[in-house]
Amino acid sequence: MEFDEMKKIWDAQNNEPLYAMDEKTLQKRIQRKKHSVLTSISEWILIISYLGAASLLVGYYSFKPGSNIFLSLEAAWMFGVVVYIVISHIRRIKASRWFDRSVHGDLYHSIYLISCQMHISQVTRWNLLPMGVIMIFSGWAAGKLFFVSAVVLVLYSLTFYAAGKGIRANKRRKQKLQVLIGKLETGK
């Protein structure tokens, strides 16, 4: 006898479902996943690292005799990225207030937070291209093209790889939560 047939017989005899969902436990589990502060931590790490690197470029290299324009351009790009991340952070915090505090609301909020984390990873990943090009031009202007290019290639390749792993992991988490939403909405 199939499970579905047994469930129908059980439901018909007892007029109650064969299994029940513990909503409080489910909501606690969703809250634990939702309150992982990965998004905020990665935003702050990016803000601090970009601000630190841009400040170093401006403070150390801008006043050095014979500095090249590409380092200033790199610093301006980094400051622009910081502004973008701060604006995204503020928007994410404001948007978090829109979700109700039910099981469904927490699920949708978790999916929203994962989407934000994926967006940060994608921005970080694709930001490497213009930053790498600017750094290579900077090395070319300074006469250290091979050394700068090698360092940029290695570091940016590792960052690109790590960001890709993060995006794939978040996609899997998001798909699992979307499946859970589907199960909750259909009751299956």
Image: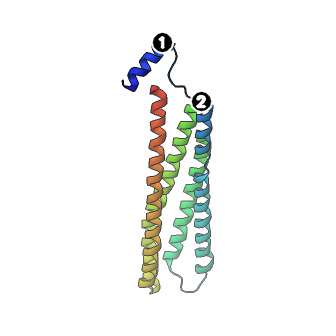
Mark seen at residue 13:
1
Residue 58 disc label: none
Q: Residues within 10 Å of mark 2 (few under 14, many from 20)?
A: few
Amino acid of disc 2: Glu
What x and y, as percent, mark residue 24? 63, 32
Q: In the rendered structure, which disc, 2 or 1, sits on the residue that comes first in sequence?
A: 1
Q: Position of residue 124 (x, y in %)?
A: 49, 60
Pinpoint residue 130: horizontal percent, then vertical percent. 43, 67
* Residue 97 vertical position relative to residue 17 in the rendered view, above or below: below
Q: In which quadrant is the N terminus drawn?
A: top left
Q: Is residue 30 left or right of residue 124?
A: right
Three-letter code for the amino acid on which mark 1 is drawn: Gln
The image quadrant where one finds the C terminus is top left
Report the front residue among 70 and 40: 40
Residue placed at 52% from the left, 48% from the top? 116
Looking at the rendered structure, the secondary structure element under dot 1 is: helix
The residue at the point 58 percent across, 53 percent down is 38
Picture quadrant of residue 106:
top right
Is the residue 134 above or below the residue 104 in the image? below
Judge whether residue 174 can be spotted in this image. Answer: yes
Residue identifier under label 2: 23
- Closer to the camera, 144 or 153? 153
Q: Can residue 98 be seen by looking at this rendering? A: no
Identity of the residue drawn at 63% across and 38% down? 28
Q: Of discs 2 and 1, which sits in the foreground?
A: 1
Residue drawn at 59 percent across, 30 percent down: 23
Res. 45 image quadrant: bottom right
Residue 98 sits in quarter? top right
